[in-house]
Image (cartoon, rainbow, N blue to C red):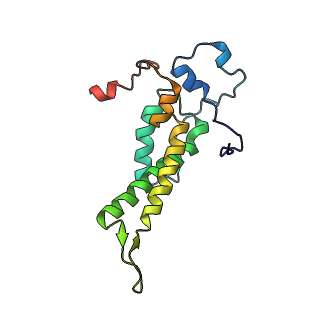
Amino acid sequence: MRPTPNGKRGRPRTPTSLKLLHGEKRPSRLPSGEPVPPTLPVEPPAYLDEDARCEWERLAAILKPMGLLTAADVDHLGVLCTAIVHHRRAVELVNRTYPVIAGQRGQEARRHPAMQVIRDQAGLIASYGARFGLSPSDRASLGVVGPVRVGGYDPGDELLD
């Protein structure tokens, strides 16, 4: 097994808030003594550009009602929002041009450099999105059955509006 980014082996633990959100009630499966971040206002980091700030607002509207965004998560969500914007911009660039470009000085055609940016940012999106329970595989591994309501919020309500 390869070490995870935080140096630990194996699958990262599911945050208690996600376990509770998905209906876990058995005390033996809920950790005791888990640090709880203070309830400070959650504001987007100052380094986000306008597009990343829009992504922040979009994701924060989903994560806050679920209890998955705290002051301790601000920079992680900032990285995710920046990665989403960089990925989108690289895809738009490739769409305006072509995935294969002519090489310099008579060289053969080569892959557009933005294709690597797309791949790198997609990896960051998958990694950081999973930390917030945003990837489909992460949700599936949590075993959610039926709609989840947290404080009157039902994610399916947005689809019906």
Task: Work out whether 1 lies above or below 94.
Answer: above
Q: Position of residue 114 (x, y in %)?
A: 43, 64
User: In the image, residue 138 lies at what x, y percent?
Assistant: 51, 33
Where residue 131 appears, as percent x and y from the top left, is 55, 38
Of residues 110 and 74, the one nearer the viewer is 110
The foreground one among 34 and 102 is 102
- Please identify the quarter of the rendering in which residue 94 is found: bottom left
The residue located at (69%, 28%) in the rendering is 35
Residue shown at 63% from the left, 35% from the top: 11
Image coordinates of residue 7 in percent, x first then y, are 71, 44
- Does residue 39 appear in this view? yes
Note whether 68 is above or below 31 in the view shown.
below
Q: Measuring 27% from the left and 26% from the top, which residue is drawn there?
A: 160
Q: Is residue 73 left or right of residue 98?
A: right
Q: Quadrant location of the N terminus? A: top right
**Outermost residue, left direction?**
161
Can residue 64 be seen?
A: no
- Describe residue 40's horizontal placement relative to residue 109 as left or right: right
Label total for image: 0
Instruction: Give the answer, above or below, for where 114 lies relative to 15.
Output: below
Looking at the rendered image, the quarter that the C terminus falls into is top left
Which residue is the extreme one toward the top? 26
**Would you identify the image quadrant in which residue 16 lies?**
top right
